[in-house]
Image (tube, rainbow, N blue to C red):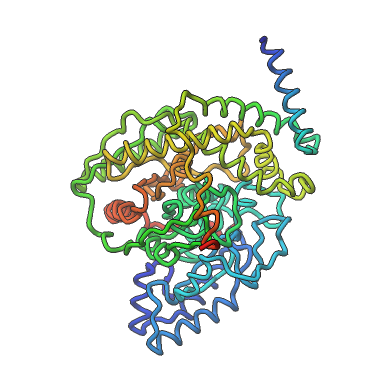
Amino acid sequence: MSSDDRSATMRQAFEAITALNGLTLPPDRVETIFEGFVGLQAMTADLRRERTAESEPAGVFVPDTITRGAAS
Amino acid sequence: MTEPLETLTIAELGDKLRNGSLTSAKITEHCLTRVADLDPSLNAFITVTGDRALADAAKADRELADGTDRGPMHGIPYGLKDIYDTAGIRTTCHSKLRQDVIPATDSICAQKLVEAGGVLLGKLSTHEFAFGGPSFDLPFPPARNPWNRNHGPGGSSSGSGAAVAMGMTRTAMGSDTGGSIRGPAAYCGVIGIKPTYGRVSRRGVFPLSYTMDHCGPLSKTVEDAAITLQAVAGYDPVDPGSADAPVPDFRATLKAGVKGMKIGLLRSFYADAEGMAPESIKAIDDAAETLRSLGAIVEDVQDASPFTQYNSCGRVILLAEAYAIHEADLKSRPLDYGRLTMERIMLGAYISSADLVQAQRLRRELSLEVNNFLLKQYDVLLAPSSMSPAPLIDAPQKGFPLAWPMQTMPFNVTGNPAMSIPIGFSESGLPLSMQIVGGYFDEATVFRVGHAYEAATQWHARWPSPSVAEAA
């Protein structure tokens, strides 16, 4: 994909997610938020690597903290 | 001439309270006078609770006279970042959205400080919702740096840092999601400790990111910070992040020194980072040398994951959680937020569910690296608290701000206790600092190392000139 194509794709994705989330961005802030969106894509790519079940995140659902004592 | 009470530590003030040579009322009046004289040009306070403070002080004096001693914070003034709920006192989050909110109950920290006999001076400035700032489009002006008011005090616990640095209070509570205690502590030249995740209840503190938020103090000295943390630490079963862990006496080993301790310097995090000031690097090298001279073994850490992994992990989790908290208001009234806050939190809308889970998986891996690998080799780790001295308060913000290598972020990701401590001054007269990072629930060792360094260097004995504030 050429850089122009990639840039156009990023713009389309940004606009689609904005619309799907029901967000109305003030026109004078769209470019700043779009720049942030592009930066985020690089950042989220950095999160990915080969993993095993060992990397299950901790504490997603722990009964004690979900009930906070209310069930005991 | 008025006695410079601001130079006395909490322990020294406590001694005088107990031998009858000083009253809490006198300490409190001194603090309120400094607030009245100096804060108009520093904006550290959003709300000064003068009547409440004098009533708290009178009660503290009566109790001591009657033989009731609530401990080291008894009769000692403090401030609260204005995201801590206080019953009957507005809690604004420095935001138009909450400028008239008056909570019915105290946050747990506020409650514990009352129980400890503390004297509430007021509510302190923050970056809006502990995130966006410094901003000039909010209902209250941003706090300024006491060492040079043209510079920022850091954020988001900006008022807490400024108030402590200028001696308006010895101690104040802040909160830290990516560095919001340690950053202002660094820029203002005071102590700021982010305790272990779960050490201090977050109940009643407006959240920014559920799994990254930490409550802790900014204080003038390491001992002041230990005393304040002692008052607020402890298990809260209603805070889902709270840890049922014993709370030791944080001052028990304060003066044990560092002889024989192994200390790892996380040089790979910052040495080649864009924007890292050479004078900050030199100050950390000098601090490492000081610790060596005190008998510690200080080595460069090998084989830590790249800093960018920690930064990306923390930023993604923070943004996703912050957006979820603010989603309804961002959709219905986005222009009621300050511009910086709105533009930053809005980015959480663009994080996918897979991104968030990958970040959570990486978080476990990085936490294991710090605790099961690095802290198996070292008693504590050292890293910068900031990349440079405090920038100008109105400096334009360049590039993608989330990529800034905030050196504090890794320990919000891992949840380890981390303390910012002053380590010198820049050529321009602004404070320089570093972090001391310890193992889970081992704040005592962090304080121990910090106290040894502080005693050897005396950077904490310097004060900003009141004329800097008065002349503004």
Residue at position x 74%, y 48% in the image? B328
Residue B187 on image: x %, y %: 48, 48
Q: Is residue B162 visible?
A: no
| Residue ranking furthest to the bottom | B66
Residue B58 vs residue B357, the one in the foreground: B357
**Nearer to the camera, A9 or B368:** B368
Q: Is residue A14 visible?
A: yes
Classify residue B225 as left or right of residue B358. Answer: left
Looking at the image, which residue is at 34% across and 72% down? Answer: B12
| A29 horizontally vs A57: left or right | right
Q: Residue furthest top?
A: A2
Q: Looking at the rendering, which quadrant does residue B1 occupy?
A: bottom left
Count every numbered label the image shows and give the total.
Answer: 0
**B419 versus A25 height, above or below:** below
Query: Where residue B315 sits in the image (x, y, percent)?
Result: 55, 37
In the image, residue B71 above or below residue A11: below
Q: Nearer the viewer, residue B88 or B212?
A: B212
Residue at 43%, 56% in the rendered image: B243
Quarter of the rendering containing residue B48 = bottom right
**Front-most of residues B298 and B351:** B351
Q: Residue furthest front?
A: A72
User: Which quadrant, please, contains the N terminus of chain A?
Assistant: top right
State the image quarter where residue B64 is shown.
Answer: bottom left
